[in-house]
Amino acid sequence: MKRKFTLLGCAALLGLGMMEANAQQLTTVLFPAQSSWKYLDNGTDQGTAWTAASFADAAWASGNAELGYGDGDEATIVSFGPNSATKYTTTYFRAQFNLAALPTANQDVVIKLRRDDGAVVFLNGQEIIRDNMPATSTYTTFASSNTATENDFRIHVIPASALQVGTNTFAVEVHQCDLSSSDLSFALQLELVEPVPPVVCDQNLDSLHISRFVSVMPSTQPDSLRIPATHTFQMLLQEGDAYTNAADGVTKGLFDFTGYVPINNSSRKGYLSINHELGSWPTAGVSMLNINFNDTTDTWVITNNAPVDFGGIGGTGRNCSGTVTPWNTIITSEETLPTADVNNDGYQDIGWMVEIDPATHTIKDYDNDGTPDKIWGMGRMSHENCVVAPDKKTVYEGADESSYGYIWKYVAHTAGDMSSGDLFVLKLDGPIGSATTGDWIGIPNYTPEDCNNVRTYASAVGATNFNSVEDVEISPLDHKIYFTSKATSRVYRFADNGSTVSHTEVFVGNSATIYNIETADGIVQEQWDGGVDNLTFDNEGNLYVIQDGGRNHIWMVPPCHTQTNPAVKLFAVTPAGCEPTGMTLSPDNRYMFVSMQHPDATNATEMRDATGALVKFNKESAIVIARKEFLGPDAIQEEDTTTSVKVIDHASLTSLYPNPTTQKVTVVMNSKITAAATIELYNVTGAVVLKQDRKITSGKNEFEIDMQQLPAGVYTTAIHINGQTLHTKIIKQ
């Protein structure tokens, strides 16, 4: 198996022995995080000679890690200088260790580095890590940014050639972000890690399912999009594209929720609702697109693009994520909480869920008084999204707030009608991490004052604060409720039992977790990292997890994943600056709609999308991703499988149904002759998987091909008659 070194993101909390085994790796610790270091904390310039093994550091002070000041958890406190307002910019650290033998070919050399704020690490006189620091620096150079996750260890894989048998010398300089920085932290651990492959659990899925892919190689964000080689994308819309009606101007920026709403359950004709996560009216809003799939070009076409008018409800603010309801409307979420009641109806103007009819581009008027309404009963908070259960009554929502990061449940009085309902907030039976059960506590939402103040009521009853709940979704397999805590970068789940919940647990993540990723170039390790944001399930229960932070990846977590037996895959590395966001899927799960928010305007790489156009990710972009079999020039011409386009001199194929199929396909053909025929079925590798001999008579012929024992995938059918062959395709689901 090929293996590849790769630079990773933030890292794990330690506390390891000399050797640690888990489901993903065998780890040998060469230099523990609590080791002793020599340090110089007098603010002087040490130049470059201090990194050499021969440097005389006998006069330096020494102490065990963690070293630093200002946090209260240091094993050794170092000096920041005589003045707390003008602290030393750089502090120096040195340590040595002995190595009996070099790593084997199956081992990665991993450094786990805790640094607040920035650090440059030398090993045996050579620079090996520059973390949160400019490309070049001196002892007066500040770190690139303040460190919010100072207790995390950041993971770096270094070449084995950096080590040597015998004595090895670490030299580390830690830099503050400014002269008044309140704290400094430093610790380092060196490990040899032998990773094992992640769990694989998609063997029985349709080979053309969108979730069937090999993980992309993780990295920092390039200036282009990296998705699996089996998939392609189409650029649908970018900021500044003209609305269909010239009087409406151009499409706004900060794309977020990208909600596909099918027309008559179609995966080829519908509406695409795009949120604009800007401030208050008139800059915020929603664009509503009519979108159709062109069967000739196998690409999507926008036939109309119009802004939604929020004027009747006093505008809208910071439209973040949302949901597509089971009755095919859009609910958009307001994430900002300015104080105003312009129309004097008692409700604060901003901070609500809003339901939109995509066909008319209008806000729902629940009481039919001629004035549109927001969903007051769901409460006023910093809404990220909601999800409606199949019963069309139960709605789960989260609040993207650090102080009021609660999980809510709204139960409508009438299915499909959000105008009134009962509101509940979740309270676990103990601390997060230990409690697995909890209760839904009723929250008053009867008057405008109640609805305006649901956060205060929830706080008063001791609701559990998960800290910045970014998304809530329902699994189509286990029907549990999944939600993200952005602050802790975890995806939690629980079972809702009506008035109580149970089986509350972390499903995947926390910023410190490292997962082994199986790429085309072998296994690499990648930090889950911070900023877990939006969630989307496909119909097979695969959970797509989108990051707003860390490296802004799109992850996929199969349903068989557990924290002890991980199965995590990496679906996309997004363009520089981008926050991927707002993902939805078509009903057949072939097409993934997603936006790229605030890309770097300097992104210059041109990519050829499924239409053949050259595009850049240098402004807000909404795209669709699919396997190449269903989008672009390599797409399967599915109309050929159901119409009489297949003709040879003495026979024609008139019908093939059902196609796609799960069991049997009926073939209908007309023949001018009576002759022996052979039917062969080939899989995608060209192997014959089925062969039948039949007698074809003059006139109409009808027969079945039994595919029940074949795995899902695309098959080529060859019907050989009198020296000629009819070809068509059958899709087994």
Image (cartoon, grey):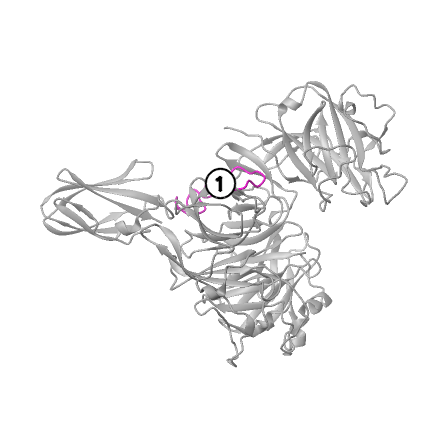
Main SS, magenta region, reads loop
Q: Which residues are magenta?
A: 200-225
Q: Is residue 302 visible?
A: yes
598 in magenta:
no
Residue 399 x/y as whole percent: 63, 61
Task: Determine the image quadrant of residue 97.
Answer: top right
Q: Which residue is mark 1?
A: 200
At horizontal 81% and vertical 45% (from top left) the residue drawn is 182
Q: Is residue 328 above or below residue 26?
A: below
Position in image of residue 511 (x %, y %): 65, 45
Mark 1 Cα within 10 Å, few/some/many (few <14, many 20+)? Answer: some
Between 132 and 507, the one nearer to me in the picture: 132
Q: Quadrant of residue 158?
A: top right
Residue 707 visible in the picture: no
On the image, which quarter does residue 263 sit in? bottom left
Q: Is residue 246 above or below residue 17?
A: below
Task: Please name the residue shown 76% across and 42% down the image.
Answer: 177
Q: Secondary structure at mark 1?
A: loop
- Whether 179 is drawn above or below 171: the answer is below
